[in-house]
Image (cartoon, coloured by chain):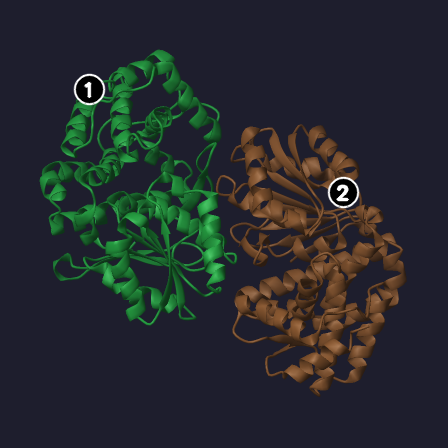
Chain colours: A green, B brown
Amino acid sequence: MDMSEAASARRIELQFDTEPRGYTISLQPGGIEELGHIVYPYARGGKCALVVDAAIRGGHGRRAEAALRDAGLEPVVSELPSGESSKSLARVEALYHRWLENGLERGAPVVALGGGVTGDAAGFAAATYLRGVPFVQCPTTLLAMVDSSVGGKVGVNVPEGKNLIGAFYQPRAVVMDPEVLRTLPSRELSAGLAECIKHGTIRDPELFAWMSDAMHAIRSLDAVAVMELVERNVAIKAAVVREDEREAGVRAHLNFGHTFAHAIEATSGYGVHLHGEAVGLGMLAAAQLAADLGMADVEVRRRLEEMVAAAGLPVRAELAGCESLRAAMALDKKVVGSRIRFVLVPRIGSAEIRDDVSEAQIDAAWDSIRS
Amino acid sequence: MDMSEAASARRIELQFDTEPRGYTISLQPGGIEELGHIVYPYARGGKCALVVDAAIRGGHGRRAEAALRDAGLEPVVSELPSGESSKSLARVEALYHRWLENGLERGAPVVALGGGVTGDAAGFAAATYLRGVPFVQCPTTLLAMVDSSVGGKVGVNVPEGKNLIGAFYQPRAVVMDPEVLRTLPSRELSAGLAECIKHGTIRDPELFAWMSDAMHAIRSLDAVAVMELVERNVAIKAAVVREDEREAGVRAHLNFGHTFAHAIEATSGYGVHLHGEAVGLGMLAAAQLAADLGMADVEVRRRLEEMVAAAGLPVRAELAGCESLRAAMALDKKVVGSRIRFVLVPRIGSAEIRDDVSEAQIDAAWDSIRS
């Protein structure tokens, strides 16, 4: 990855070498206004598709639509209702029909404007419409910027579980406009910070220390701090994805906190906790487990809890019984392998995988985050 | 592509170098009995999926299932009703649910046993289940052997048109057992021959001449003739697909006869003519058009008609009015480009694309195959 930073970090471009072609992530305040120029080269005809989260249809959605029109494009706009339920085959099928009905041909790009749900569903539709059309991501949540928009995973949920249907499909471009974070509910900002904390915890002690110092500036959306936050986290996510192409398994470290988090989400009903809130809690449970296994100093858990709290995330929650939680973990596991594998952190900045954990140890980890 | 031929052509292996990994097509009488050994290396757990055309569930389906079991695999079998209507998102979704319900994990391969419909629908499901699982094709019709199983296109139809949703997804292996052609209805065999005639016509005059001589042996399913037929045609399809990766457009030559054929199928209702029958008629209409444009000698059309008839395919049909047929062509075109592009053959063995054709010339071509 190359980084070319313009004066005073007003625009950062990160270049990715993926197959079958590379792409650029542009990180730029006001980037939405540039969307037309960025999408135009991929549109052979004048038409393109714009898929936008219903919650931002009126604000950022109108700005994006205007930017596309100003560049001479003719956007066919679709709204996706906010929330996980839009990551469904039915919604994807509705996108196909809308695009066909409006004559979108093979050269027409699909632009996704919204959070992870919008990017994943619109990306899967783009990957499979006419066997794949150009895809441009414009993530509008911190979580989508630092996590779901990097790595090429697109897909939808089925009643049996999340992300079970999908594809690997690289975008032609990713446009991140940090100014959109000003209209993001602060609870959503905190949820995005959970993945940033995770990145620092599993492989970048300097990022962890910097976030600890800069948390106030970040949460007040100081422009320089936000640019640095997004850039560093995108770089980590991209590096992990790239390393994993050679060395199977590193990507699994990104699941730190997630085995617990998925069980929290599944047992409390999706939507009670935001995914990032569940990840914050899950990282604390995992840190407890590492301490109880004698693998990490209890100080690791203390620093992590301090950081999670500083990010505005819960450090305790009402949880289902341990048996239900373990059953939910086992169900999650069933799809990815044969035993429950935990990503554990011996010290801030590194991660290991362990699958030799007793039920009693798992229950103690759960109890450490139970309110 | 390398070819290594065992003594007396009892087994032919064709090696393909595709991204992200190559694969082998094994052409072998009795190949279905080898399916277990071929699939086993791709199955990390013991489970695999077998998707089989309902029409052959009892015969070849049982043999394939037994071969998989004998190799120590545990096949989860799904039947797809015969016919184009099985290439639907609803059928693909039903496959997802069946696989999830039976605990098929990331390593579990999907084996498609049937014609193009089975291969395309099961292949699309395999491409998108858990973001892609290993896929093994076992085509049981001549058409699927020489055409749809080569090239990596998988997908389904939507009410707006055929093959509009899909992906490029390469199989891990393709197993062709020419003995299954003994149970193929002869009308289906003739339909497959249409694509073989097409291959000879657009780029291999020797294949055309050989087919002309060998037609009786082929239609009587002489083992040596069938092996040669399949091998030569797979090689042509593969070469065109490979060349097209470098030089955009060659793959379009495979549409020879298809612009007319799609209009025949659309206006007469899918299922009245087999696709191959429509292609046979379409090639004759295209040959008429080339003659009328002064591009080809009328002898080309005469030789083609003789071959189409010898293959047991119709050379005339009851057709809709010219206006309806032209409207159907325009609709087909709408999705792939801006003007109707015809693949025309100046002489047996080469093809060119023309888009400067008048309505009167198109109508005359239609009238030349109207009964």
Q: Position of residue A353 (x, y in %)?
A: 36, 27
Q: Which amino acid is tagged 1?
A: Val
Assign the N terminus of chain B to one quadrant of the image.
bottom right
Q: Is residue A370 above or below residue B164?
A: above
Nearest to the observer: residue B109 or residue B103: B103
Farthest residue, direction top: A360
Nearest the viewer among B121 and A298 is B121
Left or right, residue A202 beside residue B321: left
Task: Say yes or no: labels 1 and 2 on the same chain.
Answer: no
Dot 1 falls on which chain?
Answer: A
Residue A161 percent location from the top left of the image? 45, 33
Q: CA distance from mark 1 to mark 2?
A: 64 Å
Q: Quadrant of residue B100?
A: top right
Place of residue B193 in the rendered image (x, y in percent of width and height, measured from the top left): 78, 61
Q: Is residue A2 visible?
A: no
Q: For residue A21, which quarter of the picture?
A: bottom left
In the drawing, does residue B370 fall left or right of residue B334?
right
Q: Chain of mark 2?
A: B
Residue at 37% x, 34% y: name it.
A252
Q: Secondary structure at mark 1?
A: helix
Q: Which residue is mark 1?
A: A298
The C terminus of chain B lies in which quarter of the figure? bottom right
Q: Callout 2, which amino acid?
A: Ala
The local secondary structure at tag 2 comes to helix
In this rendering, the label closer to the viewer, 1 or 2:
2
How many neighbours does mark 1 have within 10 angstroms: few (below 14), some (14-19), or many (20 or more)? some
Residue at the spot x=13%, y=41% of the render?
A: A219
Measured along the vertical axis of the image, is residue A249 above or below residue A125? above
In the picture shown, does residue B157 fall above or below B197?
A: above
Q: Which mark is residue B55?
A: 2
* Residue A52, label in figure: none
